[in-house]
Image (cartoon, grey):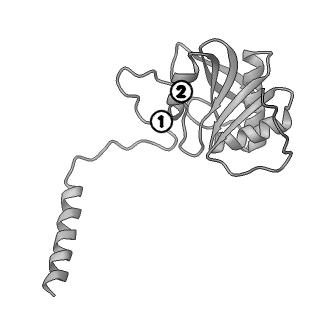
Amino acid sequence: MKSVFFSLFTLFMLTVSSQAQAPTKLRHFMQAAPTPAGAIPYGANPKAGRYVNVGDAKIYYEVYGKGAPIVVLHGGIVGSTYEMHPFIDSLKKSYLVIAVTTRGHGKSEMGSEAPTYQRKAEDVMAVINAVTKDSVMVLGFSDGAYTGYFLATAHPEKVKKLIAIGAGEWKQGFRTFNNT
């Protein structure tokens, strides 16, 4: 009985002490985490940021580096371009990085159309067409990987390689990519 009481008392004290700490500032839905001091504010960089109009929405993207083009797509729900900073930091040394903020996230508008994967793929295609005439590689994380699947299926002539991270297998419209 003493051990049960002691365990409950300890649990109570841990709960009280954790609530006594200073509260963190709440952020609204889909707002990116604050950028650490000195870091490039990917997803909100006025030096690299641009917009493309797609229907009634403005889609935000940033361009970094030089070389063969690679599109970088962040995850969904509360995802942001900033979460892709390790990839962007590394890839921009050798590639032209096109970091797209997908519809309804960050600085991209939602517009009146539902943000389906088909819609997001067409948004990304509009960004690609605004930046380059070349075919691209696509690196997508989670929701961005699914958008990449749809983009590669709808525009096989523009997507030469697809790197899908954290997404399930996709067989609809599946095609193989050459190892070049």
Pointer 2 or 1: first along the chain? 1
Pick whichever, 178 or 26, lies toward us: 178
- Residue 3 figure quarter: bottom left
Q: CA distance from mark 2 to mark 1?
A: 8 Å
Q: Residue at x 40, y 32 (%)?
A: 34
Q: Position of residue 169 (x, y in %)?
A: 73, 51
Q: Which quarter of the rendered picture does the C terminus lie within?
A: top right
Which disc is residue 159 wearing? none
Residue 48 to residue 79: above or below: above
Q: Describe the element under mark 1 as helix, strand or loop.
A: loop
Q: Position of residue 109 (x, y in %)?
A: 63, 32
Dot 2 amino acid type? Gly
Q: Residue at x 63, y 20 (%)?
A: 97
Tag 2 residue: 43
Give the side of residue 75 with respect to residue 29, left or right.
right
- Residue 62 figure quarter: top right
Q: Position of residue 8 (x, y in %)?
A: 20, 76
- Residue 136 figure quarter: top right
Give the side of residue 47 with respect to residue 20, left or right.
right
Tag 1 residue: 32
Across the whole image, how many numbered discs are drawn on residues?
2
